[in-house]
Image (tube, helix red, strand yellow):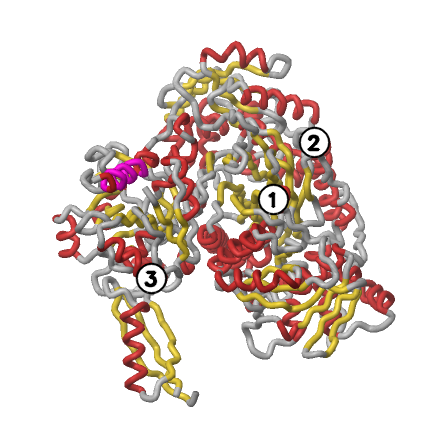
């Protein structure tokens, strides 16, 4: 018999259990509760924080509590989306960890009855010169590619950042988005007594046992030894499972569906029972097994991939089994929905688990951690803005920034991803925002994935808001209205008061941004304990923002300068180097206080950007992000294959003006006939003419950077990650 | 023209080809599950779509090449019917020996997905009649095993019989090592059988930009032209 | 009787073994200067029920010809590893 500690429980949690049951839980029950009450499954540390996030809105069909959020995208269709982390598995087994991360989030989308149409990945790697970073990054990228490509869901974009804090603890966040008709949405809350519990997909093996518990502790040397528990992904089966589930959906044969992710059968079945307010009986001896001699607790906690739990009407089972057989998938009745609240597991006729479903799913005591603000003020002490003394400094700084791994071209990554399958990708990876055609209703969706860990480390509230706002701006510049967001909160242990404070403040920033900009956070996930003996990760909220462009379609691409286009900078001139790429690359450390979140400015920017796109008053738009104005212009020039003459002289503009970050700002390319209308549109918002497109070099006053030189710098890739040809 | 798209377990471009045919020609294709043993009556064109049939396990296309429907596809080809294999479909065609050679892992040992240009080497096949000799087409690639291989003397014979229909080339028509994305021998991107009615190619015509954005976009119309050319050939043959 | 048959599949001489070449270059870079060549192939285990060893080998060869090996690019060897009662 194991004790509560071995099951991963705290004493107080164990006592809660005994009180609720009026008896000691047996070993299998203890193991189940241990996993279900782990941070990963229960969100016990963050529930009170997550409750503060805005998740309601006219367009929201489904929010937190379902497998993913769904927002209305018009004409009776919804976009289901969610981002999820798979950090710990990717740290110990990069290829499989990343692959199963992609697979898991795709199943979350399928579980709602949606067809997955796009994925994105947030990648956070360590110091690129660290040998471990090379093997981790190439393994993780191959894993995303290997799984996503084979399953036929395009990876249309993402975000990649490098910082030494991720060397031992890389992050892999995967986002998936699917399309569903309103009447096809499948819930996980509608099971009724008498219905059957069915498992569909792969057989259950010993892989990934107790992965959820693994994800809820700090990484140690032992984690590497625990490698056998890593799940193995099979994208081929996932593809078959996708098609089978969507066929079952079309035939109306599914009552409820839930992906088997962390804690496998136990979590999926008990969650359906608890959310539906019913009981459930599961016969473990009926579960199709891959390995011999598996114990009930192993079956309960197995994280074998490519499995779905379905609730079906008894009279529909035959039809379901026939469809499963056609797709070559295992399908078995493993239990029944019952009256009441009892979650029972039988093992060859013997009742081995009997717990209230609500106890497993809802009653994990919330963990309240002490919170204490670290000393941010000393880092905020104003820093002497470094001025470019002469033109060679500016040239050198821009080239160094373009060459830095976080800002450099990522085609070595995204060329490995099939970004085009399903033929909806209008704008794919490499652009600030990805655009997808929605075949079903003629509209378009814009998705941006953003994160600003450095600013979060200096001011978690402002950093959290900035991370979110950056995505809202990016979709707005393309012409979309942000209609929903998903967040992945990657943080170190919440048990240290400073770290809990930081987490709380980032969430407060996200909540403020979502509320002020009316962009509900409809799904998400939390990954804590991202730290190891060598240190903790930066606070890393990854936010996926989904925007809608309604037909008749009018949108503005990036990297689309035409000769003679007038270039405009919209947004305030002032920005900040605090937490910028500039500080990281040039100073080697960050300091200062990032720009405050200014909801009024953000809303005006969004509104005007939308008008600009609706009236198609610009050829090209790019929001200012990492590296500020100079890097934005360089990226526009490179993507357009064209230079520009800029009325921005490095001798009169300091580095803050050139490389500062933060706040709603964008550069637009406007063709001559639209100049008057463009200026009229942006009247009342800071807007200045900064130059004209054309030529083979980017000319900042007297500083001239040939495109070839910019391209050479920008296309440099971290060592050993380059193409071999 | 009646097109039948074969669906293997793991195919993932089958629907894309269906959409491509619909947007270019306004026709609905039949989707044929791999366990069938006959093609729908009246089939003019069989398309073996891209994807990862059987997970690309063992060898790409190997298991799909042995599936029940392939007997009917072979008979269709033998009777002069059109067969088109795209990407994984090309691999299925070489594995089933309907086309010579084999497709090996890219020399980069990486999956490559990117826009790509190919040069039309022959305009006298049913698949390329709408194009000009040496015309450059914009068809993207997305594959891990796309390096076309054939032993030396057989490759010479293949070239001599003018079976190479498409070659990877730069936008100004140069087919050399720098315009070769995957290391394919002689920059080969697509070949036909001796009779000319079976075409395999690695690039994806159904992903050409115009299929995506519609004709108003001004994007390359190569994808639409490709399907229209095949239809005109098939319909003309019917009328004969 | 169950016969355990192992099949080794290699790319033919003259077919570019991109994986082998890549591994060779990494080994050389890592200081294993004595390595001259690397070839990477597949190892397949078959359990074949048949009355005799000869019959099992014959069946294994047939499987190689039918599916397991592509004779345009690959060559193979078949070996009987042992047998046990079914």
In the rendered image, which quarter is residue B116 located in?
Answer: top left
For label 3, the residue is B62
Give how far across and how far down residue A668 sits, in percent. Answer: 51, 21
Residue drawn where x is 74% and y is 48% of the image: A500
Chain letter belonging to callout 3: B
Label 3 or label 1, whichever lies nearer to me, is: 3
**What's drawn in magenta, residue-wise?**
B227-237
In the rendered image, which quarter is residue A413 located in?
Answer: top left
Residue drawn where x is 30% and y is 52% of the image: B90
For label 2, the residue is A518
Chain letter belonging to callout 1: A
Q: Residues within 10 Å of mark 2 (few under 14, many from 20)?
A: some
For label 1, the residue is A81
Q: Residue furthest top?
A: A676
Whole-angstrom CA distance, mark 3 to mark 1, is 36 Å
Q: Main secondary structure of the magenta part?
A: helix
């Amino acid at each position: 018999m194991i004790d509560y500690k071995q099951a991963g429980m705290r004493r107080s949690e164990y006592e809660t259990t005994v009180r609720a049951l009026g008896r000691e839980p047996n070993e299998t029950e203890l193991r189940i509760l241990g996993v279900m009450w782990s941070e990963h499954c229960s969100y016990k540390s963050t529930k009170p924080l997550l409750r503060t996030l805005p998740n309601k809105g006219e367009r929201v069909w489904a929010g937190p509590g379902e497998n993913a959020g769904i927002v209305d995208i018009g004409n009776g269709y919804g976009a289901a989306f969610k981002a999820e982390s798979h950090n710990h598995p990717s740290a110990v087994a990069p290829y499989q960890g990343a692959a199963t991360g992609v697979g898991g989030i795709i199943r979350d989308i399928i579980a709602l009855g949606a067809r997955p149409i796009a994925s994105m990945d947030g990648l956070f790697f360590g110091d690129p010169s660290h040998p471990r970073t090379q093997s981790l990054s190439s393994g993780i990228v191959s894993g995303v590619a290997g799984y996503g490509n084979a399953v036929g869901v395009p990876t249309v974009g993402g975000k990649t950042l490098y910082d030494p804090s991720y060397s031992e603890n890389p992050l892999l966040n995967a986002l998936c988005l699917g399309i569903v008709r309103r009447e096809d949405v499948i819930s996980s809350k509608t099971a009724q007594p008498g219905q059957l519990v069915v498992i569909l997909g792969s057989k259950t093996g010993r892989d990934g046992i107790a992965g959820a518990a693994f994800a809820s502790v700090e990484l140690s040397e032992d984690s590497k030894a625990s490698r056998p528990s890593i799940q193995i992904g099979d994208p081929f089966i996932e593809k078959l499972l996708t098609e089978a589930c969507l066929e079952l959906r079309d035939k109306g044969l599914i009552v409820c569906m839930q992906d088997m992710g962390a804690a496998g059968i136990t979590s999926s079945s008990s969650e359906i029972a608890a959310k539906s307010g019913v009981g459930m009986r599961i016969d473990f001896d009926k579960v199709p097994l891959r390995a011999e001699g598996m114990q009930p607790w192993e079956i309960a906690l197995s994280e074998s991939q490519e499995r779905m739990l379905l609730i079906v009407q008894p009279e529909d089972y035959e039809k379901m089994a026939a469809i499963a057989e056609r797709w070559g998938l295992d399908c078995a009745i493993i239990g029944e929905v019952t009256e009441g609240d009892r979650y029972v597991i039988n093992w060859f006729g013997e009742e081995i688990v009997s717990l209230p479903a609500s106890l497993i799913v809802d009653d994990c005591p919330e963990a309240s951690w002490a919170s204490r603000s670290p000393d941010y003020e000393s880092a905020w002490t104003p820093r002497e803005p470094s001025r470019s003394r002469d033109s060679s400094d500016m040239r050198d700084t821009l080239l160094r920034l373009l060459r830095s791994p976080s800002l450099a071209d990522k085609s070595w990554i995204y060329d490995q991803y099939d970004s085009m399958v399903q033929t909806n990708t209008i704008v794919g990876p490499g652009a600030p925002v990805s655009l997808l055609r929605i075949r079903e209703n003629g509209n378009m969706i814009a998705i941006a994935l953003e994160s600003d860990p450095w600013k979060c480390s200096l001011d978690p509230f402002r950093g959290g808001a900035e991370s979110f706002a950056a995505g809202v701006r990016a979709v707005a510049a393309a012409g979309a209205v942000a209609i929903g967001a998903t967040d992945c909160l990657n943080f170190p242990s919440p048990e240290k008061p400073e770290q809990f404070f930081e987490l709380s403040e980032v969430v407060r920033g996200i909540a403020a941004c979502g509320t002020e900009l009316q962009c509900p956070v409809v799904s998400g996930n939390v990954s804590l304990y991202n730290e190891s003996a060598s240190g903790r990760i930066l606070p890393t909220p990854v936010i996926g923002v989904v925007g809608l462009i309604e037909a008749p379609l009018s949108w503005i691409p990036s990297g689309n300068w035409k000769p003679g286009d007038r270039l405009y900078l919209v947004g305030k001139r002032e920005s900040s180097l605090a937490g910028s790429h500039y500080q990281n690359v040039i100073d080697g450390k960050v300091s200062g206080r990032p720009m405050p979140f200014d909801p009024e400015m953000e809303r005006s920017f969004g509104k005007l950007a939308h008008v600009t796109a609706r009236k198609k008053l610009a050829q090209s738009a790019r929001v200012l992000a990492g590296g500020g104005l100079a890097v934005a212009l360089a990226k526009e020039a490179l993507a357009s294959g064209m230079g520009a003459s800029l009325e921005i002289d490095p001798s009169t503009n300091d580095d803050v003006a050139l490389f500062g970050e933060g706040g709603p700002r964008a550069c637009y390319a406007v063709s001559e006939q639209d100049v008057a209308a463009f200026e009229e549109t942006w009247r009342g918002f800071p807007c200045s003419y900064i130059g004209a497109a054309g030529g083979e070099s980017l000319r900042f006053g007297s500083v001239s950077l040939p495109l070839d030189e910019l391209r050479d710098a920008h296309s440099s890739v971290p060592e050993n990650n380059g193409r071999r040809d | 023209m009646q097109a039948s798209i074969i669906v293997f377990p793991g195919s993932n471009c089958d629907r894309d080809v269906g959409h491509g045919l619909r947007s270019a020609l306004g026709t609905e294709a039949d989707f044929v599950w791999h366990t069938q043993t006959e093609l729908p009556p009246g089939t003019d064109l069989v398309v073996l779509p891209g994807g990862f049939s059987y997970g690309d396990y063992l060898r790409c296309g190997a298991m799909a090449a042995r599936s029940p429907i392939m007997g009917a596809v072979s008979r269709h080809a033998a009777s002069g019917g059109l067969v088109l294999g795209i990407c994984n479909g090309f691999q299925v065609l070489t594995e089933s020996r309907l086309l010579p050679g084999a497709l090996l892992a890219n020399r980069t040992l990486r999956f490559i997905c990117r826009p790509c240009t190919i040069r039309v080497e022959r305009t006298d096949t049913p698949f390329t009649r709408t194009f000009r000799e040496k015309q450059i087409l914009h068809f993207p690639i997305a594959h891990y095993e796309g390096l076309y291989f054939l032993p030396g003397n057989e490759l010479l014979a293949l070239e001599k019989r003018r079976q190479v229909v498409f070659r990877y080339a730069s936008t100004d028509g140069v087919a050399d090592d720098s315009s070769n994305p995957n290391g394919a021998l002689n920059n080969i991107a697509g070949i036909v059988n001796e009779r000319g009615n079976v075409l395999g190619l690695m690039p994806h015509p159904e992903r050409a930009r115009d299929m995506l954005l519609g004709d108003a976009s001004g994007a390359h119309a190569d994808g639409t032209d490709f399907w229209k050319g095949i239809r005109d050939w098939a319909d003309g043959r019917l009328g004969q | 009787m169950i016969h355990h048959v192992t099949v080794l599949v290699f790319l033919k001489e003259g077919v570019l073994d991109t994986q082998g070449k890549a591994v060779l270059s990494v080994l050389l870079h890592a200081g294993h200067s004595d390595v001259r060549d690397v070839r990477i192939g597949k190892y397949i285990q078959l359990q074949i029920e048949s009355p005799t060893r000869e019959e099992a080998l014959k069946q294994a060869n047939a499987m190689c010809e039918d599916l397991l090996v592509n004779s345009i690019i690959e060559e193979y060897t078949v070996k009987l590893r042992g047998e046990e009662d079914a």
